[in-house]
Structure formats: structure tokens, C-alpha cells
Amino acid sequence: MARSRQWCIVLGLLVVIAGCGRQAEDPAEAAYRTFRGAYIDAASRAEQVALVEAFVAEHPDHRAAGYYATDLIAHYAHDLGQPAQACAAVEPLLARITDPEGRLELAAALAPVAAEAGRPLDLAPYIAAVEAQGPLGFDARETVMAAACKVGDWPLAASHAEAALARSTPEAWREDNPNRELSDDEVATRAQRRRVTALTYRAWALYNQGQTADAFTLFEQADRDRVNDYLGLVSAPLDRFWASALLREGNAAAALERISRDAAFGDREQAGPVFRQAWAAVNGSEEGVDEQLWQARQRLARSIDDFTLADYDGRQQSLGDLRRGKVLMLAFWFPT
Amino acid sequence: MELPRLQTLYESYREQGFEIVAVEANRDTEQARKFIADKGLTFTMLEDGADDAEVVSSVFGVWAFPTSLLVDREGRVMYAHVGFELGDEETLEEEIKSLL
């Protein structure tokens, strides 16, 4: 059963949602807080889905409605394996969600499932609705590129990757984030991260259009630009696309090496199958794949970086002191 | 992983040497304090630094929430988990037990 990652909120949306939270008197916002609290405390998926359905039906104009509605897709299509039912549940909502970006996000999440259900969904009108308000931001481009790759619309993926590349400069980042006051170094890092993402999608789109040599050049370029990719956690899907291309070119050993870290620590759900295929191609069968993955994990595990931050009593705490000799869970979170 | 569910794991395994450190990434001090008190969270709670002093994205490259890392007694990151769905706590519990 494929597990989706509905609880993955990227920083951009986080800031928007957190910003909404400050207008405490807004009834939609109050309803959102109540919904979100109940969602966290829910005892079952069925209960969560019911909460999402009720919230989105009641507040299709809330900024987070499109985001949460993607949970319905995860539930029907991935948990239950019923893509047609996902379409039936989400299509009426698509028409009601008022925020064009939220609607595009939901349409992009539905597109691969709709294709699977045999009723392809054209993203063009959803993209046009966002563009009517101004050029697509980087995050929206990323959403479109990812969806286009999933449904195999390579020209769409390539054109948005091109546009995303143009927005991968420090100047563009500052324009898109006027309220963030970061140093030039930090902004440069963020711009570079955008660049890696754009290059990755462009490479994969080119590869699938038969431009093999250009694609590998771009994969290598993205690899050189890769920044702060701690275990490859939430980075662009560079290693997965690159490994898939290597595998198709018949270079299974290189593919296996390329995908190992992502399969061991990163996006296991998507990297796992590529690892499995690469291992089967190297080994002659899938036998021993779990052992191989376990070994990759031992070999590639990195040491935790130390840091010092303040607790809520104002005391400085060092991670090294807190974890000494213990098994540690380091949890990154934010309240909503 | 959602923090209230981590609290349960913390209570089950802390005597065997399991520690949790949570870092709030958005510097929303007031909401964080309220959440911690409401949910009765008793493990170590830290707040990320401002701008250039921030750790979550600049040191760990974490851009999506919640994200959790599981570190063994030798300080090696052995498991990473992005996002959370009901049922994930069982996977996480198995991973914790394998390291204790």
C-alpha cells in the first residue's frame, strides 16, 4: 500500500497559514483551528477524512482548503486504491475552492490519480487562473512540474522547469519573499536550492523526450549545485530521476549507487521501487534486497550535527549534551 | 510525527534511554507555549534561532514539517521521517526499539 505524505507542509505554505492564524476573530480561521486540532487528535483515517470533507465543504474559501483536500486523494486513491472514487470526491471541491493557487495545488495532486482512473485532467485552466493574478511563483511551478512528470506530460514539465530556472536567482527569491530578512548567503542558498530543483525536472523532462546527453549534463550540473542535502531529506528528486535514467540506459550498478541514500533515508516510498529494480538488475533477482538496503543504511548513515538553541525558559541547550549516550528523536515542528 | 503522539512513545521508552528534542521552526513562541501546555508535552522543547541563527533549514536542510530524525547512541542518524499519517507511529516505534 502506497503511503502518501499529506503531513508534509512546505515552508511557504507554513508562513501563509501561520500568518492567517493571527486574525483570531475571523470565523473561517477559528473553524480552521478547531478542525486542525481535531484532525491531529483523530483516532482513525476515516475520522480524519470526515473532518476534512466537512471543513472543505464549509470553508472552500480558506487558504488551506486546497491543501487539506489533497488528503482525500491520499485516502481514496492510495489508502483504498480507488482512484475513481478520489476523482468523485475531489472534482466537486475543485469547482468550489476559491483560492486559485490552492485550486491548482489540488488539481495537480488529482491529475496523476485522474489519469490512473482513465479520466485525464487538463491542468491548463488551473494554471491560467493563477496566471490571471500574476506570474506563477516558484512553488506553483514546482507543483506543476511534479504533476507533469507523474502524468508524463514532458513538454509541460520542460516549459515550467525553464521558467522555474529563471526564478532561481537571489533577486527573484527576494522578490518572492519580501518579508524575510535574510543575509545574502542565506538567500543565495535558497536560490541555489531552487536551481537544483529546476535543473532536475528539466533534465528528467529532456531525458523522456529523447535528449539523453543533454539530460545527463543537467543531472551533473544539478548535482554540483546541490546544497545542504542532509540525508537527501526533502530535496528535489534528483537522485531518483537520475537513477531511473541510468537504469534505462543499462547502467544498473551506477543506478543502485545513485539511489541508495534516498532509498535508505529519504523518499523511501518513491525511491524504494527504483532501488529494488536496480538491485534486481545488478543481482539477477530481487533476492537479498532488504539486506542490501540495510547495508546501504549502515554504510551511508551520517553523524548528527550539534547545535545550541534556547528552550522556553530561556536556557541555552546543546544537542550534544541532551543526547549523550541515548537514542534520540529530533523532531522539527511548528504549531498551527 | 505529530508531537502528542511522540509524547506517548517518550513515556514508553525514556527509561530505556530514549530522548526527544523538538525544535519549533516557525518561532511562533506564544502558540508553541500554548500547544505544549495544552497537550502536556514533557520532553525537551527548543525554539529555532532567528534569520541567520536558524538551524532547521540551514543546518538540517529541512523544509517540510513535521520531520523527525532518529539518532542512535553513537550519534548516527539512522532513520528520517517526513510528514505524518496515522499509523506512522507504529513504524517509528519499531525503529526506536531496534536502536534501544
Image (spheres, rainbow, N blue to C red):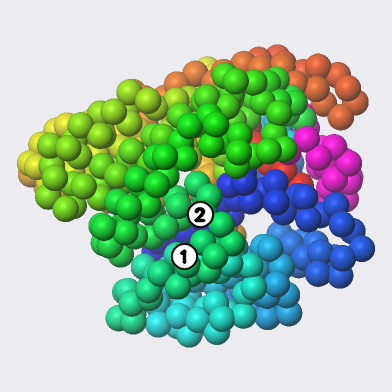
Pick the front one: B34 or A1: B34
Whichever of callouts 2 and 1 sits on the residue coming sooner in the sequence is 1
Is any part of residue A44 visible from this angle? no
Mark 2 on the same chain as mark 1: yes
Mark 1 packing: few (<14 Cα in 10 Å), some, or many (20+)?
many
The residue positioned 59% from the left and 54% from the top of the image is A7
Disc 2: which residue = A136
Q: Is residue A335 above or below residue A1?
A: above
Left or right? Give the position of A3 relative to A332.
left
Q: Amino acid at mark 2?
A: Leu
Pick the front one: A240 or A2: A240
- Picture quadrant of residue A223: top left
Per the model, the C-alpha gap separating discs 2 and 1 is: 8 Å
Left or right? Give the position of A255 relative to A226.
left
Is any part of residue A67 visible from this angle? yes
As for residue A46 lying within the magenta part, the answer is: no
Q: Amino acid at mark 1?
A: Ile
Q: Which residues are magenta?
A: B26-46
Q: Is residue A136 above or below residue B46?
A: below
Left or right? Give the position of A45 relative to A318.
left
The residue positioned 68% from the left and 63% from the top of the image is A63
Disc 1: which residue = A127
Marked residue chain, label 2:
A
Residue A269 image label: none
The residue positioned 68% from the left and 38% from the top of the image is A178
Marked residue chain, label 1:
A
